[in-house]
Amino acid sequence: AMRSSHARALMRALRRASSTPRIMSLLPSATEIVGGLGLEGHLVGVSHECDVAPTADRLRAVLEAGCERVTTSDIDPHALPQGEIDRRVKAALKEGGDGALYGVDAAAVARAAPTVLLTQTLCGVCAPATSAVEAVLTAADVAPVVANLEPTTIDDVAESFKTVARACGVPARGEDLVAEFYDHLDRVRRAAEAASSSRPRVLLLEWLHPPFD
């Protein structure tokens, strides 16, 4: 048993040291960042909600090549009205806490054998809870580098590009993506400043029933 445990630990160390990352993303925005870095071909697992990497066609190709969906949810946001989704989410959280909303397939995680795991700790509603992820990694006997993304500002979003790039071993690509991001924001800002004074006033809400941002 001791020899088997040592062998598993050695394999985990070798995976972490590999120059070819095996990336698992449990967050749609992180999957998009991976695509923005040009690393979508290294994805071995994504969440059931991930939809672009950095485009829908590229993610579809990655899934067809063997990347697995490793999370599930009993709440289908495409089949239910917002008020019903809100009710079910609140009921699930009240009954089972943050870990009640999403399932993570330990067998799929073990098959994927990720060396990098991208997730978040900001919101128990947005992605699998940290405690659930940790339990699955233990059950799957994998020990990837874990990058938690917790942006709360535009600058934090840019910083998350660098966080993902460092975790995946391509820090220079992260710097390039940040520069591209700020350049795009600057173009939007200049276009807004040049627009007519009669341009509409915009309110951005993430959810309408009940309203919150």
Image: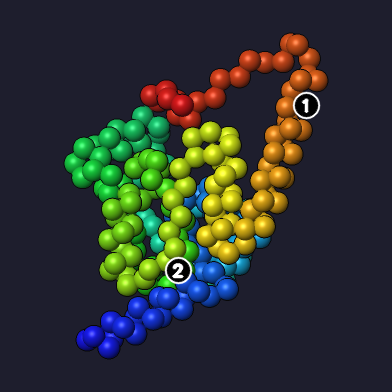
Residue 142 rendering spot, x and y as whole percentages: 36, 71
- Considering every residue shown, the one lying at the far left of the view is 95
The one of 105 and 6 positioned closer to us in this rendering: 6
Q: In this picture, is 37 found above or below 209?
A: below
Per the image, the residue denoted by label 2 is 114
Residue 2 rendering spot, x and y as whole percentages: 23, 85
Name the residue at 31% across, 38% down.
Answer: 89
Mark pair 1, 2: CA separation: 42 Å
Residue 187 rendering spot, x and y as whole percentages: 76, 33
Name the residue at 61% across, 67% down.
Answer: 41
The one of 81 and 1 positioned closer to us in this rendering: 1
Name the residue at 43% across, 59% down.
Answer: 146
> How crowded is the residue under tag 1: few (<14 C-alpha within 10 Å), some, or many (20+)?
few
> How crowded is the residue under tag 2: few (<14 C-alpha within 10 Å), some, or many (20+)?
many
Per the image, the residue denoted by label 1 is 190
Q: Is residue 98 left or right of residue 162?
A: left
Q: Amino acid at mark 2?
A: Pro
Which SS class for mark 1? helix
